[in-house]
Amino acid sequence: MYLEHFGLNDAPFRLTPNLAYLYEDSSQAAASTMVKTALDQGAGFIKVTGEVGLGKTLLCRRLLADLTTPYLTAWLPDPHVSPGTLRAALARDLGVALPSRPSQQEVHHRLHHHLTALVAAGRKPVLLIDEAQALSDSALETVRLLTNLETERSKLLQVILLGQPELDQRLASPRFRQLRQRIVYSCQLEPLDRPAVGLYLAHRLAEAGCDRPLFSAAAIAAIAKASAGTPRLVNVLADKSLLAAYGCGKDRVCRAEVRRAIADTEATRDTLGGPWWQPTARMAGFGLVAFGVFLALETWLGGGG
Ligand SMILES: Nc1ncnc2c1ncn2[C@@H]1O[C@H](COP(=O)(O)OP(=O)(O)O)[C@@H](O)[C@H]1O
Ligand SMILES: [Mg+2]
């Protein structure tokens, strides 16, 4: 691998959301602050939307780490669950003791009882749901009913929904009118801008043990453009560019390596509308064909004359 070659002690651009590599860009910071303020205000529902790869799962992990006592968190990473499984998962995360085959009513009753006791003891139970756009209608309705539980003074459960923009389309449906009305706090994760991409790359490299600038300014500009500032794509392109530079025995990444990474990355077709080299390659290909035809014609005419 290229780690030793570049003096790195860890792979800097892995795709798993790892808090050790968190770069505090303005959008992440704003979202984290908004969520904490909203929780503090006692909001029942809080919503964070963002396109794929912008850092929703990372934000989730960060909140799980940051929300210490009095908060008590439960996390639903996979929303493809029935209402029953959702309730059971929440109960398990919050430490509710359940009999072996509880009825739905039983789970709901015990959950209510446990949440009441927690809140009475000064705790603040919070449920985080990642990929919330994929919740079924019935699961979403179950979540709404759970946040209906309250004492005279506060909610028994606060819910943070994190999801792709499709979540807004789901909530726009008339059947979620009530739920929509209760989402007072929401925000949207934004892509990194061009300077932030440079800082993001440098931050991850430094975390992995390399303080030397491994990417030229032109390389950073090319990554920023091809990724449209989406951190996951930045990671993919940075990793492939480092590999390309390593393959050529170079000690840093220049635009040429990024071009190779882009050509090798399907997802940049969405951001660039096709790999950057496609028009160039097409023109070069056309030029070659034209030249070949010209040579063939000349040989033929020459031979004939
Ligand atoms: N602010 C950030 N700092 C560091 N890494 C980030 C940041 N935002 C996103 N990433 C990285 O980008 C990748 C995609 O993030 P992820 O949370 O999985 O996105 P999403 O859940 O929105 O699809 C992960 O590798 C994650 O670590
Ligand atoms: Mg995610």
Image (spheres, rainbow, N blue to C red):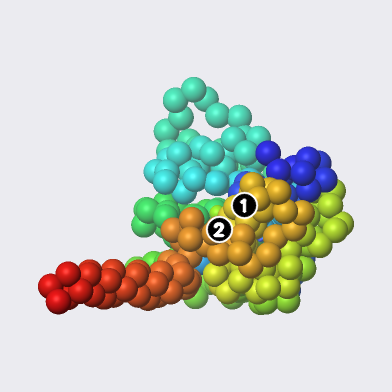
Label 2 close to label 1 by CB (< 8 Å): yes
> Picture coordinates of residue 151 (x, y %)?
65, 58
Q: Residue at x 12, y 73 (%)?
A: 304
Q: In the rendered view, would you say 2 is above or below 214?
A: above
**Kind of residue at badge 2:** Ala
Q: In the rendered view, would you say 304 is above or below 58?
A: below
Residue carrying label 2? 261
Which residue is most to the left? 304
Answer with the quadrant where ligand 2 appears in the image. bottom right
Q: Quadrant of the N terminus?
A: top right
Q: Quadrant of the C terminus?
A: bottom left
Local secondary structure at mark 2: helix
**Kind of residue at badge 1:** Ala
Local secondary structure at mark 1: helix
Judge depth for marks 2 and 1 and give the one in front.
1
- Using the rendered view, name the quadrant where residue 134 is placed: bottom left
Q: Residue at x 39, y 43 (%)?
A: 82
Residue carrying label 1? 244
111 displayed left or right of 171: right
Which residue is most to the top? 100
Ligand 1 within 8 Å of disc 2? The answer is no
Res 163 visible: no
Q: Residue at x 59, y 35 (%)?
A: 92
240 displayed left or right of 254: left
- Using the rendered view, name the quadrant where residue 237 is placed: bottom right
Category of crowding for the residue at label 1, using alpha-carbon neighbours closer than 10 angstroms: few (below 14), some (14–19), many (at least 20): many
> Picture coordinates of residue 287 (x, y %)?
35, 75
Quote the CA–CA distance across marks 2 and 1. 8 Å
Which residue is most to the front? 305
Category of crowding for the residue at label 2, using alpha-carbon neighbours closer than 10 angstroms: few (below 14), some (14–19), many (at least 20): many
